[in-house]
Image: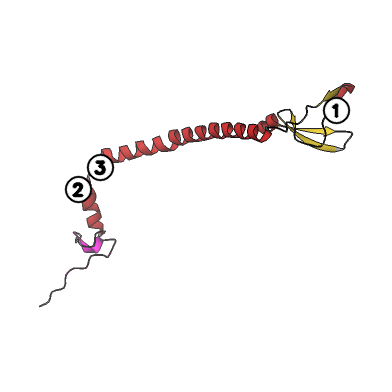
Amino acid sequence: LLLLDIFLDVVYVGRLKSTYLVFRSHLVSPYCKEQTIKMSGGAVAKLARPQLRGHFHRYLNETFVYASIGAAIAGGAYYYFALLAHRTRRDNLYRDFDPEKEFVRLRDLGFYQNVPPKDASKALYSYYKPPEDDE
């Protein structure tokens, strides 16, 4: 809400009984060339004329700048919080990883279809079926 308040101000025009949005001191309403607003204490303020030429181009340039800054912040946050953490977890896993020990563990669980487990009764998976004797 505070960021929105920096960029957008709502201005009430008493004579026209309507509300206008002012963006960076440029009036969005194209109806009036100049408007006066009564401020507190009876002072009168004049609003600037709307920018009609080049307004869309300027708006796009500002939007691209804000989008680039937001993308850079999001990319940095992703790199720092997600990618670096993933790399350290992966490095810690493979630092002490023994593929032979992992193979034996999976074989004993009965995970492989063509490799018999040491003890078939303890196998969690039933892929392996012992060969039948054709006698």
Which SS class for mark 1? strand
Mark 3 or 1: in front is 1
Placement of 35 over or under 127, stated as above or below: above
Residue 77 part of the magenta segment = no
Pick whichever, 22 or 122, lies toward us: 22
Q: Which residue is mark 1?
A: 36
- For image coordinates 27% across by 37% down, the residue present is 95
Magenta range is 118-131
Circle count: 3
Give coordinates of residue 31: x percent, y percent: 81, 37
Q: Are the residues tagged 3 and 1 within 8 Å (C-beta)?
A: no
**Disc 1 residue type (three-letter):** Thr
In percent of width and height, residue 46 lies at 82, 25
Label 2, label 3: how many angstroms apart (C-alpha)? 9 Å
**Side of 121 where 16 appears, left or right:** right
Give the quarter of the image for residue 44.
top right
Q: Secondary structure at mark 3?
A: loop
Is 124 in the magenta? Answer: yes
Q: Position of residue 12 (x, y in %)?
A: 83, 33
User: Which of the marked residues, 2 or 1, is nearer the chain's N terminus?
Assistant: 1
Q: Earlier in the sequence, mark 3 or mark 1?
A: 1
Q: Nearer the viewer, mark 2 or mark 1?
A: 1
Q: Secondary structure at mark 2?
A: helix
How packed mark 3 is, by other alpha carbons closer than 10 Å (few <14, some 14-19, many 20 or more), is few
Side of 20 where 78 appears, left or right: left
The residue nearer to you, when weighing 13 against 83, is 13
Residue annotated with mark 2: 100
Where does the image place residue 135, in percent across and percent down from the top left?
Answer: 10, 78
Q: Which residue is mark 3?
A: 97
Q: CA distance from mark 2 to mark 1?
A: 83 Å
- Locate residue 69: give its quadrant: top right
